[in-house]
C-alpha cells in the first residue's frame, strides 16, 4: 500500500492497476490485491469496469472501436474451472464433416475433468461434460467419433447421418480414426466403427 500512499492513489485505483482489459477474474484472484474485496467488486461492477459473468466470476471488458469486447470462451471457461485442461467443442462443428448435419446449436460443449452440467457464463451457454480423456485440439477423426457418441441428441435423422458417417470414415486415414475410436469412443461407438475399421484392425 506504500505506493498508493506516496502517490495519493486510492486503494480502489491501486486494485485497478492489477486488472487487465480482456481478463477474467475470480473473487479469490481479486482478494489478493485488496482487503475489502466485496466492496471493491461492487464498486467496480457499478462503474462498469468489471461485469459479472457468473457467481464469483468477473470480466474486465476490453474496449474496441466497436465498444466493449466480451472475454473469449477460453478465458471464461478457464476462469470458471480454475483449470486449463479442457476442450471446447460444439455440435455446429459436425456440419463441416460432410455427413448431412446442418442444424445450428446455441451452446458450446466443454470436455473437462472437473465440472458437469449446463451453465451460463457471460450470457453464453456452456454444457460442461466430464470425460477422462479428450484431445488437446479438435481433429476430423475426433469429431467423427464425437458425433457418433452424441448422435441421439442431434436433430437430424439418425440412420441417415450414420450412413454418411460410414462413407466419410472409409475415406479417412484409418489408423488415425482407429486411434480416435479407441481413445474417445464409447462402447456403442466402438461397435459401430468395428465394421468400417475391421480391415485395418486385421492388418495391424
Image (cartoon, rainbow, N blue to C red):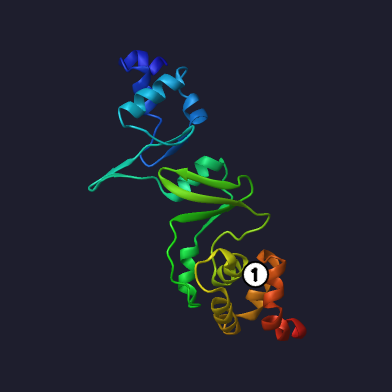
- Coordinates of residue 58 in the picture (x, y in percent): 43, 35
Observer-nearest of 90 and 85: 90
Give left or right: position of 131 versus 158.
right
Give left or right: position of 202 versus 180.
right
Quarter of image, res 143: bottom right
Q: How many marks?
A: 1
- Picture layout, residue 133 above or below residue 1: below
| Secondary element at image label 1 | helix
Give left or right: position of 75 versus 178.
left
Observer-nearest of 84 and 80: 80
Who's the residue at 34% across and 40% down the image? 61
Observer-nearest of 19 and 49: 49
- Coordinates of residue 107 in the picture (x, y in percent): 46, 55
- Picture layout, residue 202 above or below residue 106: below
| Disc 1 packing (10 Å; few <14; some 14–19; many ≥20) | many
Give left or right: position of 166 versus 18.
right
- Coordinates of residue 135 in the picture (x, y in percent): 60, 61
Who's the residue at 54% across and 76% down the image? 161
- Coordinates of residue 190 in the picture (x, y in percent): 70, 72
- Picture layout, residue 64 above or below residue 159: above
Observer-nearest of 125 and 21: 125
The residue labelled by disc 1 is 180
In the rendered image, which quarter contains the N terminus? top left
Amino acid at each position: 500500500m506504500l505506493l498508493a500512499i506516496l502517490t495519493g492513489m486510492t486503494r480502489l485505483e491501486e486494485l485497478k492497476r492489477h486488472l487487465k482489459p480482456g481478463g477474467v477474474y475470480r473473487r479469490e484472484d481479486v482478494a489478493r490485491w485488496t482487503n475489502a474485496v466485496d466492496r471493491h467488486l461492487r464498486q467496480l461492477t457499478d462503474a462498469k469496469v468489471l461485469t459479472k459473468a457468473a457467481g464469483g466470476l468477473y470480466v474486465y471488458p476490453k474496449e474496441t472501436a466497436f465498444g466493449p469486447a466480451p472475454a473469449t470462451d477460453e478465458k471464461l471457461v478457464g476462469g470458471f474451472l480454475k483449470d486449463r485442461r479442457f476442450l471446447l467443442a460444439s455440435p455446429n462443428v459436425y456440419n463441416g464433416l460432410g455427413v448431412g448435419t446442418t442444424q445450428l446449436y446455441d451452446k458450446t460443449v466443454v470436455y473437462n475433468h472437473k465440472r458437469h452440467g449446463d451453465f451460463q457464463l457471460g450470457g453464453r451457454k456452456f454444457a460442461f461434460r466430464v470425460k477422462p480423456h479428450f484431445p488437446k485440439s479438435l481433429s476430423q477423426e475426433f469429431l467423427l467419433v464425437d458425433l457418433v457418441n452424441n448422435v441421439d441428441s442431434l436433430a437430424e435423422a439418425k440412420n441417415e447421418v450414420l450412413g454418411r458417417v460410414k462413407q466419410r470414415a472409409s475415406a479417412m486415414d484409418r489408423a488415425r480414426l482407429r486411434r480416435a475410436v479407441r481413445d474417445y469412443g464409447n462402447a456403442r461407438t466402438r461397435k459401430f466403427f468395428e465394421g468400417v475399421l475391421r480391415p485395418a484392425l486385421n492388418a495391424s
